[in-house]
Amino acid sequence: MLFLRSLLFYIGMILALLVWAPLIVIAPLFSYPKRYRLLVKWGYFTIWWLEKTCRLTYKLHGVENLPQTPSIVLSKHQSACEAIMYLKIFPMQTWLLKHELIWIPIYGLALKNLEAITIKRQNIRKSMQQIVEKGQQSLQAGRWVIIFPEGTRVLPGKTKRYGIGGALLAEKSGYPVVPVAHNAGKFWPKQSFIKQPGIVDIVIGPVIETKGKTYQEINTLTEEWIEKTMKEL
């Protein structure tokens, strides 16, 4: 049954993306806020469909920690699950992604039209420059910036070195950091077709004020809170 439910989920998700395709193509004709509202509805559907087919949903903790102004979200990364759920949790947002995702048919065009920050990992210096420049532009335009500092999905109980891109953006821009921990990998494991039923716990941590702090200090504070919280989940 888990296989059949997961298969049904993927079929519905792909069909929905095909239905949204015409909107994705004409999205540049609209202002960014309207374009955003149109395109993220696919994500809203996916969250709803995930609950209906796989009986997988989420519970949000620490909502009182959410600031009222655009911020930089530095989050644990275990699966594709949390990235989709963040569409409903955080206000209008953009994401830091590897450049290769832009080449995925339809989906990649949607990311491009939503002005995702894409980087090529081979050129670290240029990537850092893009993160700071485009990240500041997004924040000043009223968009939250979602970054996974580990750079790739990690298995539950594991961790990777935290990259400095998000912390560097925070240092240069002065915008606050919102650390986020979760256990999505328990239900939607990396490179697994099967989705386990259950409730993903997503924990929003206290805001880390970044003015007057170096990127090293910001990164250390972020990593310490996230990894400590992960042990409690």
Image: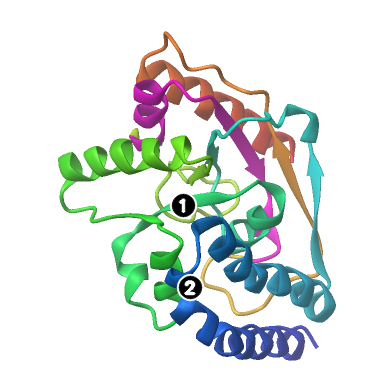
User: Element type at marker 1?
Assistant: strand
Residue 161 in view, yes or no: no
Q: How crowded is the residue under tag 1: few (<14 C-alpha within 10 Å), some, or many (20+)?
A: many
Residue 187 in view, yes or no: yes
| Residue positioned 49% across, 25% down in the render | 175
Seen in the image, is 133 located left or right of residue 223?
Answer: left
Residue 175 on the magenta segment: yes
Seen in the image, is 97 located left or right of residue 5?
Answer: left
Residue type at mark 1: give it: Trp
| Residue positioned 47% across, 37% down in the render | 139
Q: Is residue 28 above or below residue 133?
A: below
* Numbered circle sitting on residue 95: 1
Q: Position of residue 137 (x, y in %)?
A: 38, 40
Q: How crowded is the residue under tag 2: few (<14 C-alpha within 10 Å), some, or many (20+)?
A: many
Q: Quadrant of residue 111?
A: bottom left
User: Element type at marker 2?
Assistant: helix
Colour approach in the figure: rainbow
Residue type at mark 2: give it: Ala
First in sequence: mark 2 vs mark 1: 2
The residue tagged 2 is 27
Q: CA distance from mark 2 to mark 1?
A: 18 Å
**Magenta-tinted stretch:** 165-188
Q: Position of residue 146 (x, y in %)?
A: 51, 46
